[in-house]
Image (spheres, coloured by chain):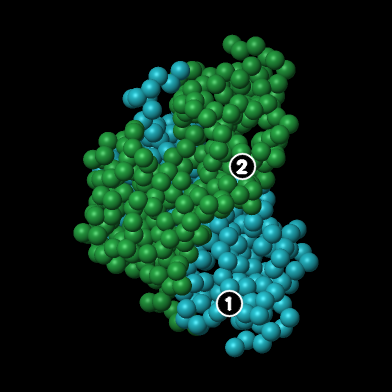
Chain colours: A cyan, B green
Amino acid sequence: MAENHGGSGGNGILSVVGTGPGSADYLTPAALNALRQADVIIGYRTYLDLIASIIEEKEVVASAMMQEVDRVNRAFDLAEQGRHIALVSGGDPGIYAMAGLVYEVAEARASDTEIRVIAGVAALNVCAERLGAPLMHDFATISLSDLLTPWDVIETRVRAAVGADFVLVIYNPRSKKRDWQLARVLEIVTDMRGTQTVVGMVHAATREDEKVIVTTVAQFDPKLADMQTLVIIGNSATYIRNDRMITPRGYKEKYRLA
Amino acid sequence: MAENHGGSGGNGILSVVGTGPGSADYLTPAALNALRQADVIIGYRTYLDLIASIIEEKEVVASAMMQEVDRVNRAFDLAEQGRHIALVSGGDPGIYAMAGLVYEVAEARASDTEIRVIAGVAALNVCAERLGAPLMHDFATISLSDLLTPWDVIETRVRAAVGADFVLVIYNPRSKKRDWQLARVLEIVTDMRGTQTVVGMVHAATREDEKVIVTTVAQFDPKLADMQTLVIIGNSATYIRNDRMITPRGYKEKYRLA
């Protein structure tokens, strides 16, 4: 197979490293160690800028434009030279991100590179934190990107989740090209759960331009969302207190709280 | 209101700190800083043992037996003396954990203590990492604990999620007293999605007694699960490769992978 160029291992290592939402406060020691141990770091420019101080002495392959599939193949090309490659993923590579594509490409290439996934603090974790406590009860996580999933499958899932009173966590709510899907979801929520349903939105969590909104579906403007935004829609019991959204777990019915 | 005992602030601070799955490799700098800044650390004994070296010079209130509601009230009692209290939560306090109860108790007590939630790497993040890449597509997170939720609501959610082909993330799958619920979920999955549906289980992720199983619903023994276990059930496209469970995102239909 691949030649051994004297790197980290005979067949190389590909670490898929979750760097969290952006701020170094949420970068785990596991991720930091993987970045330090790697010979080469590959990632989308935005994510690399966030960890610039850590990676300044490394060989870096920044890919502003490269497609995800090409980026992963490039990572395997380098790993198969016997080197340790860190493929950087914002948030958690295990949630709608690079981990799956890495395993799928490994299979397609029949690569025997060692794959290591390192979980990170995902958008859903940190956005829930910023919004209050919206995920105290069962929740359904749905991506509105119809690039790889037909819209009717997405809408069926939204209806099923709203019907069974899940909290909804909406990934990829809106982009320049996908400008009507979030509004459609809000329509469904309004019809099935009512205009006073609580909606929370976090843009660019932990970064300089972070923006947090907690409101009702009647008041919420879907145009505020973009690809750096996560939207969380409460269940029928979610309420607002001091600008935070709180989904009660049900203690109140069972215990005296104070 | 409360007297000021010269602590961190006039009205005190209550930090709800997610310490991740167990290993210090997943403890974020944000969590570490909050623990270091706190005057008093409160938590369930198991979680405190995991961060023993960090907290050795702190005043510690370990609660082996104390009920959650009592523990949170104790934290407010101390914070209202003007001190900074860190309430430790394993995993992420924002997912089925202490964040919500803290906000609810604050309201019940009409407390003006400053509340800070610090997200952590949750069980779902790290268990997905251990299992491969099961969360590459839409997923529904459901707790099987019927202490605060009637079982028929839980079963309705399971059916809705399986029907709409969500991946299922099962929290609190089984305890000594709740010994039939997971088997019931597996029955529903078998009926609706078939015997070859992939099931993954992680017990005590990142700890010494970690155990990872990837198998099919036909082969899976629910008796292996307990309260330290997370179960992830694949969607109709999830497959097993090299003992890992992978939910494809759909690239294969659209791109050449290698």
Q: Looking at the picture, do discs 1 and 2 lie on one chain?
A: no
Check the image and name the residue furthest to the left: B191
* Residue A242 shows in this picture: no
Which residue, given by chain and number where applicable, does mark 1 sit on?
Answer: A113
Residue sitting at 38 percent across and 22 percent down?
A: A255
Q: Residues within 10 Å of mark 1 (few under 14, many from 20)?
A: many
Q: In the drawing, does residue B195 fall left or right of residue B103? A: left
User: Disc number at residue B50?
Assistant: 2
How dense is the environment of label 2, judged by Cα within 10 Å: few (below 14), some, or many (20 and up)? some
Q: What distance separates the C-alpha of mark 1 from that of mark 2?
A: 33 Å
Q: Percent from the top left, x then y, of residue B256?
A: 45, 82
In terms of depth relative to the viewer, which is nearer, A112 or A73?
A112
Amino acid type for the residue under numbered disc 1: Thr
- B113 in relation to B88, above or below: above
The N terminus of chain A sits in image quarter: bottom right
Instruction: Give the residue drawn at x 41%, y 76%.
Output: B252
The amino acid type of the residue labelled 2 equals Leu
Q: Is residue A130 above or below residue A203?
A: above
Mark yes or no: residue B123 visible: yes
Tag 1 near tag 2, CB within 8 Å = no
**Secondary-structure class at tag 2:** helix
- Looking at the image, is B167 positioned above or below residue B47? below
Q: Secondary structure at mark 1?
A: loop
